[in-house]
Image: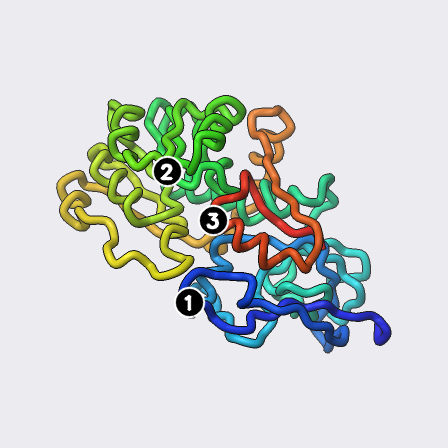
Amino acid sequence: MSDTVNRQILLVEKPTGKLGPEHFKMVKGAVPEPKDGEALVRTRYISLDAANRAWMHGATYRAAVEANTVMAGGGIAEVVSSKAPGFSKGDIVFSSDTGWQDYAVVPAKHLTKMPDVEPMTHLLSVYGIAGLTAYFGLLHVGKPREGETVVVSAAAGSVGSIVGQIAKIKGCNVIGIAGGKDKCHWLTSELGFDAAVDYKDGATFKALRAAAPKGIDVYFDNVGGDILEACLSLMNNRGRIACCGAISQYDGVPSAHGPRGVPGLIVVKRLTMQGFIVMDYMDQSAAALADLQSWVASGKLKVQEDVIDGIENTPKALIGLLAGENRGKRMVRV
């Protein structure tokens, strides 16, 4: 592999305001060699997630990304050579540690062997972290019951679009919150949501109240901030809020105020508000994948992907994701 070049995208400085192309640069390095217990993998698809931006602020459930290092990120990769038992050349794997580069050396404990699925992109979307996050966050944390009203924010994104569809499969009344008329129309006409609220209209609370006259039983929160505040005040007694992320506060300066009504509304309405990380549920992933695969096969769950070509376009693709450009799961084909 010595004559092969490893293209890498570095985070050259941590942004203090909005993320821009100037915060990244592409370099060419040598292809690393695996040591005992490691495998050399070639990245096929890089997953783009709002969390990529959160890692630049500081440590989250993983270490912070430091300046002048390869930008962190997960992806689907192919094993090139292995010194790790259980992994051999040609295996397709998922790793949260490949980073934005052609080749990476990854310890076996950070690799998950993936099934042979066509298209391979489904391993990052519906059968990957996005699908599993939607599944466990909604069903294990939100615990919706048939006939209840479920609201999901960032509803046209990789996780939200799947959450809403699973809630429909479970017999719920589903309202999505998304940015722009096109996305809202897509949610109701293509994905079967009962209603969609365009937060860019500026009257989110009023539109939500009209869409959910019986109140909200389950709110799947991807954004935090003002939208979480609007939903809090419309929650029914003993409602559940599954806290998945806070994309409204990742890029640029986080807004100074969080949702008001905490803990007042939580106490009065006896609400349950729980954060979760999908990794906590990985021991149950086989059962989740069986459900997801049967729903996709039967046409009950539609898969929307947003695939961008070329590793050099990864920074631009993440910046666009943070601005809400994508519909469904965004990823880069290396």
Neighbourhood count class around disc 3 (C-alpha, 10 Å): few under 14, some 14–19, many 20 upward: few
Q: Which type of secondary structure does the marked residue at label 2 adopt?
A: helix
Alpha carbon of mark 1 to alpha carbon of mark 2: how far?
Answer: 26 Å
Q: Amino acid at mark 1?
A: His
Q: Residue at x 51, y 61 (%)?
A: 20
Q: Amino acid at mark 2?
A: Lys
Q: Which one is nearer the viewer's eye here, 16 or 107?
A: 16
Q: Which residue is mark 3?
A: 323
User: Which comes sooner in the sequence, label 3 or label 1?
Assistant: 1
Where 135 sits versus 9, above or below?
above
Q: Is residue 166 visible?
A: no
Q: Quadrant of the C terminus?
A: bottom right
Neighbourhood count class around disc 2 (C-alpha, 10 Å): few under 14, some 14–19, many 20 upward: few
Alpha carbon of mark 3 to alpha carbon of mark 1: how far?
Answer: 18 Å
Which quadrant of the view contains residue 16?
bottom left
**Nearest to viewer (mark 3 / mark 1):** 3
Query: What is the number of the mark on residue 200?
Result: 2
Residue 295, x across and y down, in percent = 58, 29
Where 158 sits versus 257, above or below?
above
Residue 112, x across and y down, in percent = 65, 57
Q: Which residue is mark 1?
A: 57
Q: Quadrant of the N terminus?
A: bottom right
Q: Residue at x 38, y 33 (%)?
A: 198
**Nearest to viewer (mark 1 / mark 2):** 2
Alpha carbon of mark 2 to alpha carbon of mark 3: how far?
Answer: 12 Å
Which quadrant of the view contains residue 68?
bottom right
